[in-house]
Image (spheres, rainbow, N blue to C red):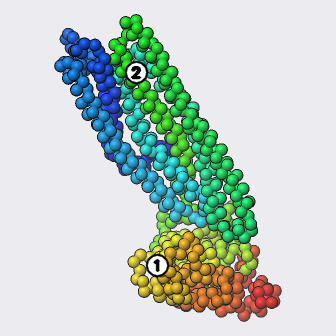
Amino acid sequence: MKEYLRLVRFLKPYKWLLVISFVLNLLYSLSNAISVYLSIPLLKTLFQSGENTQITQGAPPVNFFESIKYNFDQYIFSNGKLAALNKVCVLLLIFYFAKNLFGYMQSILTQYVEKSLITSVRQKLYNKFNSLSLKYFAERRAGDIISRFINDVNLIQNTVSVTFTNLLKEPLLIIIFVSMAFFISWKLTLISIVIIPLSLGLIVQIGKKLRKYSKQVQQKLGEFTSVIAETIYGSKIIRAFSMEKFENKRFEIKLKSYFRALMKNSIYSDLSSPLTEFISVSIGVFIIWYGGRQIFGGAGLAPEEFLGFLIIVFQLMTPIKDISTVNNRVQEASAATNRIFEILDTKPEIYDSPSSIEKSSFDGSIEFRDVSFNYDVDEKLILNKINLKINKYDKIAIVGLSGVGKSTLIDLLPRFYDVSSGEILIDGINIKDIRLSSLRSFFGIVTQEIILFNDTIKNNIAYGYENIPMNKIIEAAQNANAHDFIMQTENGYDTIIGERGMKLSGGEKQRVAIARALLKNAPIMIFDEATSSLDTESENLIQEAIERLIKNNTSIVIAHRLSTIKDADRIVVLHEGSVEDIGTHTDLMKNDSGIYRKLYEMQFS
């Protein structure tokens, strides 16, 4: 409930709309109550014997409520039954029209506030995602994150309307109907009011169970959503290894677990309404029995007043049932809200310090000083005491066996992760003291696993730029050896390439990524095994594009194919997380026992 109240604070910008909504609810409730009360004079007009309907005689009563009743009777029944019938029918039309008008206006207003709230929550969640480090996403399933963003927020969306409509309207209706019932008979009202504490106690107990199982539902939903996401991503591998039956079984287990959680949630969600209604009907039946005995004994209400009282009492059942629904929805939303605020409350591990500065250019060098890194405190160091200096316009290659920390080393430069100890300097300034936006503007990155978006080729090349001239995009594509194949696609630069660029080959995706990096023209270029999985023809095309790209830039290249880095100014050899050796290809080949020579001989033996 605490988290749900935090969610309510998102409504602060709409407080005046909520005030108007409250007024409309009040008018709706009054119109509804009056339209129900009009059943008494209607019954009296239709079923009382004689040509004229009896009205209260004598001086007006002093009691406020009795005075209202007296004046109302005088107005309705003063001119006979036909006139009374006409007046009651006109009043019924007026108040039913008013009731529905106010209800419609309130509903539209609530929908606006609700959808504005949900839009705000989703925007804050998305902004938070983009502020979190890569470590956050590496430790969580994509399906669970998507489930929170879509399903949990949808659950809140379905709750807000019910909460802020029914939570205002139903208590008002209950108060008004109970007041009207007191107005007709305080004795019968005291008997019937027993329903309220019984129903509330029931609602509270069911709500506790519902919150528990609602949280389980959201967790199970995240689990099987993750399986779906993995199945889509790994569809080729699943078929290659004939694992369809295994994956079907895995999904079935997750889906059945979700089904069981859903059923437990539904049992308690749907239990409160029939139980509350049964209690209400039980009280109503008792009132009918008790009131009927009073009428037969001649000591009770007039028959039309008793029937009007019954109508009012049974009208109370709907708002009381709806309040139980509100409680159920609030409990479900509280579980979903917990999961949403778990994300919103996550503190980004990578952030700008208050004293961080803007830096507009890379002028001198990059320096690693005693840099060590591990993902978690208890894990083994991936990098250990790295010392390395890279001067402007240097062409540096990083080599080593798989898992020695090559990619991790370059991921520290744009602060995808922060060092565990030591420091990284650019032009003598610790990168933690440089604004992230300006720090990352120094780097153009091309990796083996190319990230492309389900958009046009043009927009993928121009990613991060608005209103850039088309000739600049074409020039970048030509320099990346991509223009020819782009023009052969269905719509040229306007061709949609599909999710993850699935409509392109590996080499074509690489060249689009290089064109994107060329357009950015960053002073420091990073290539993380950009050609390791390509055929010879594609590799040659991409190698040509890379050479154009690094011509006037500082470049850092991670490569398994050592033939592509022989001309580097310096080659850094990593072994077990440390720098084992640094030198040119010629220098390193002279060391008969060195790792670089062993790697080279293994590739060309």
Compared with residue 428, is residue 549 higher up or lower down, i.e. above or below?
below
| Residue that numbered label 1 is attached to | 494
Q: Which amino acid does label 2 sit on?
A: Leu
Residue 30 seen: no
In the rendered image, the vertical position of residue 448 relative to residue 259, given as above or below = below
Q: Is residue 159 above or below residue 351?
A: above
- Residue 128 horizontal/vertical position (percent): 51, 60
* Front one among 94 and 420: 94
Give the side of residue 397 with respect to residue 29, left or right: right
Q: Determine whether, in the image, residue 280 is placed left or right of residue 21.
A: right
Q: Which secondary structure, mark 1?
A: helix
Relative placement, left or right, of 14 versus 55 is right
Residue at x 45%, y 45% (from the top left corner): 160
Residue in the picture at 73% in, 64% down: 243
In the rendered image, which residue does mark 2 sit on? 310
Position of residue 60 measured from the top left corner of the image (x, y, whole percent): 21, 14
Residue 533 coordinates in the image, percent (x, y): 67, 81
The nearer-to-camera label among 1 and 2 is: 2
Residue 485, horizontal then vertical, whole percent: 54, 86
Name the residue located 48 percent from the left edge and 44 percent from the top edge: 159
Distance between mark 1 and mark 2 Cα atoms: 70 Å
Three-letter amino acid code at the position of disc 1: Asp
Pointer 2: residues within 10 angstroms few (<14), some, or many (20+)?
A: some
For the residue labelled by badge 2, is the local secondary structure a helix, a strand or a loop? helix
Q: How many marks?
A: 2
Q: Between 399 and 446, which is closer to the camera in this rendering?
A: 446
| Visible residue check, residue 541 | yes
